[in-house]
């Protein structure tokens, strides 16, 4: 029996260094990043800003692959079923925390099936109205919405813009009639044309119209004011702190990926985000490069957002179209 035990220990001693060496060698082959949205969109572009630098750092290709469809569920599900080895990632926004509650038959759970690797960028949005709107502040807009029916453009059920709008409605105690669109550009066109009363939109899409006086920005949905219109207060400053939630684009791996691999990826994403040219490119895209976040901080953020959007979706009785 002792002899068998000694043999087992010897075998274990031989295997452990090999496993450690394999993990320390990560990445030893190309990494695949799944974007669950159309190629060329903002999530795709944000992914490439980070992965181009990361690939150069590792001297390994990082291939970004668009797998859109089913409200981002197709690409998300693909990563949820991929090997837990760190070679297949997902980059997405808050939809990963909201979709399971929208009745979309999502077969994955954001807390159980994924590990957040790092936030690539924060994406601020603004509440904007036509120049002819009588509302010149958020308080005035809320009063207007309580006095008569208003509508807004919804770029997609469960999108970060949709969820932010629903959260603001619930916090402010107002009702806005949703008009469905496929994306934000047509929303801005119709807002400029007077077909819509308000839009919750990415700052990069509306900045030029605000600066030209064609739209009025009443509030910023973000952690801080944006450089495009520094005089516009955040929702927190305007008195609606519970609605001041900033959207994000983040990388994820499948749960069960070796801890050493997760820590390597997390640390190197942080190194890339600290690069001045990366931060500059994110700003030009209308976002903000995130500060490095630890794996524990990512876990807490995903858990908090999952609980928040689940509550908003239930309160608003929101269902996927």
Image (cartoon, helix red, strand yellow):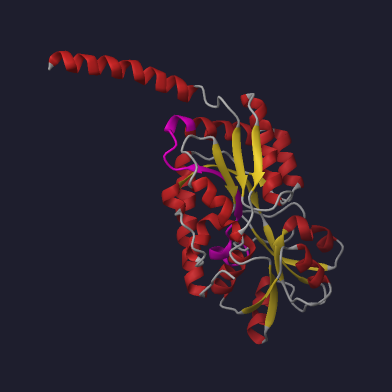
In the shown orientation, is residue 258 left or right of residue 64? left
Q: Is residue 77 above or below residue 213?
A: above
In the shown orientation, is residue 125 left or right of residue 192? left
In the shown orientation, is residue 131 left or right of residue 268? right
Residue extent of the magenta highlight: 237-261
- Residue 307 drawn at (x, y percent): 45, 60
- Residue 133 drawn at (x, y percent): 78, 77
Whether the magenta-drawn stretch holds residue 248 is answered as yes
Task: Say which of 249 and 181 sits in front.
Answer: 181
**Which quarter of the rendering shows the N terminus?**
top left
Task: Report the residue at 74% width, 41% height from top.
Answer: 281
Quarter where residue 126 is shown: bottom right
- Residue 3 drawn at (x, y percent): 16, 13
Q: Is residue 294 above or below residue 77?
A: above
Given the current orientation, which residue lies at the most extreme left position? 1
**Which quarter of the rendering shows the C terminus?**
bottom right
Task: Say which of 239 and 263 sits in front.
Answer: 263
Task: Say which of 72 and 227 sits in front.
Answer: 72
Given the current orientation, which residue lies at the most extreme right position? 212
């Amino acid at each position: 029996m002792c002899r068998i035990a000694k043999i087992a220990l010897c075998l274990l001693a031989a295997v452990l260094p090999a496993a450690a060496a394999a993990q320390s060698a990560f990445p030893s082959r190309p990494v695949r990043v799944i974007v669950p949205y159309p190629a060329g969109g903002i999530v795709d572009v944000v992914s490439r800003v980070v992965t181009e630098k990361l690939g150069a750092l590792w001297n390994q290709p990082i291939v970004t692959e668009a797998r859109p469809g089913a409200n981002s569920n197709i690409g998300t599900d693909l990563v949820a079923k991929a090997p837990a080895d760190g070679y297949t990632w997902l980059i997405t926004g808050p939809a990963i925390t909201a979709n399971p509650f929208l009745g979309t038959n999502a077969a994955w759970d954001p807390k159980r099936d994924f590990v957040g690797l790092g936030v690539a960028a924060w994406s601020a949005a603004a509440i904007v109205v036509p120049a002819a709107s009588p509302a010149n502040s958020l308080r005035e807009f809320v009063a207007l919405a309580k006095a008569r029916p208003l509508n807004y453009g919804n770029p997609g059920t469960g999108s970060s813009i949709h969820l932010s709008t629903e959260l603001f409605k619930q916090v402010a105690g107002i009702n806005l009639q949703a008009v469905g669109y496929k994306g934000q550009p047509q929303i801005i066109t119709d807002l400029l044309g007077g077909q819509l009363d308000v839009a919750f939109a990415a700052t990069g899409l509306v900045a030029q119209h605000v600066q030209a006086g064609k739209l009025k920005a009443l509030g910023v949905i973000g952690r801080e004011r944006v450089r495009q219109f520094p005089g516009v207060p955040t929702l927190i400053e305007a008195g609606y702190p519970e609605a001041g939630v900033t959207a994000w684009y983040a990388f994820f791996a499948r749960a069960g990926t070796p801890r050493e691999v997760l820590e390597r990826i997390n640390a190197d994403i942080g190194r890339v985000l600290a690069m001045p040219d990366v931060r500059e490119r994110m700003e030009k895209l209308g976002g903000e490069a995130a500060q490095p976040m630890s794996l524990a901080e990512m876990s807490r953020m995903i858990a908090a957002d999952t609980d928040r959007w689940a509550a908003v979706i239930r309160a608003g009785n929101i269902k996927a179209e």
